[in-house]
Image: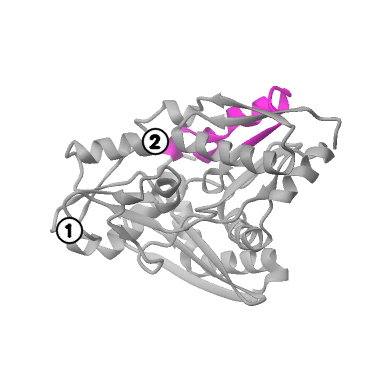
Amino acid sequence: MSHRKYLKIATRKSPLAIWQATHIKNLINNIHPHLSIKLVPVITKGDIILDKIVLNIGGKSVFVKELEQLILKRQADLAVHSIKDLPAYFPEGLGLVSICKRDIPHDVFVSNNYCSIEDLPNGAIIGTSSLRRKCQIISYRPDLLIRSIRGNIGTRLNKLDEGEYDAIILAAAGLKRLGLENRISQILPTNVLLPAVGQGAIGVECCLDDSYLINLLQLLNHEDTAVCIKAERAMNTYLQGGCELPVASFAILEGNDIWLRGLIGKPDGSMIIKKEVRGSRLKFEEIGISLAKKLLISGGKDFFEQIIFKYNI
């Protein structure tokens, strides 16, 4: 592996993305201390357009397309992502080659005046732009008002602190990585808010013909996490190919088995379908597809058709 002296990591410019890319840089340097690694920060379309929901500006690819272009143009060697931001499919020649150990996967309730989502008074304003979070919150607390919020973690916390919202919902892992755990009022249990596909895990993408880099990056792969994430992504891919629709999925290992839970909801929270599947961890892809089929048969297919029509996808 001595023939490579330099690596460039493509990353978004947000503080969380920089933290994650630096984390990967440090992990690689622990294995190869003499490798010179440089971050290449990029502003993505998803970072610029903050007044529209992600679905209306191109889905999850708006957070990764520019990073992938850098790899394809050989201006970067790899890209670091929050796996929950990754679409289902990669451009030809690129792929997810390493999935790092998952951090806390839960969503959290953040408020300056209330200790929990249960404490919010009727009509309280809660901030989220995620259809997945929105439909589950409305289902749990139909009396709350959901108002859209976009931007990085710091931007969202500032809006909360300025009084625009009574509370906001964020991913626990992001706050933890930025040293902002003290802002967490309540870790939301998965029966209230099932996480996004891949939430809490960092993934590394590179060219699939770069065997040197793949061999290096696979040393960062955490197999137990990877099995769970691949089951979740298999469900998501079979369902809807990565559009930002109200879909949640969460897998955990029970010995040599996977317990995979999934959810499809209507954005207005009027109906949510929840299903689960258990099976051998060796069959993670089949488990994901099996769960997707259960959800579609139970009425999820109608949800998607309505949403696709509404948002003109």
> Which residues make up the magenta segment?
53-79
**Residue 223 in which image quadrant:** bottom right
Q: Distance between the residues labelled 1 and 2?
A: 24 Å
Q: At x 68% / y 63%, what residue is drawn? A: 285
The tag earlier along the polypeptide, 1 or 2, is 1
- Which quarter of the image is occupied by the N terminus? top right
Q: Which residue lies furthest to the front in this view?
A: 33
Position of 250 with respect to 95 (left or right) is: left
Position of 68 with respect to 149 (left or right) is: right
Q: At x 56% / y 47%, what residue is drawn? A: 83
Q: In the rendered image, which residue does mark 1 sit on?
A: 120
Q: What residue type is labelled 1?
A: Leu
Position of 23 with respect to 298 (left or right) is: right
Q: In the rendered image, which residue does mark 2 sit on?
A: 152
Q: At x 66% / y 25%, what residue is drawn? A: 70
Q: Where is residue 69 in the image (x, y as percent from the top left)?
A: 65, 26
Question: Mainly helix, strand or loop, the magenta region?
Answer: helix
Q: Which amino acid does label 2 sit on?
A: Asn
| Rendered view: 302 above or below 283 | above
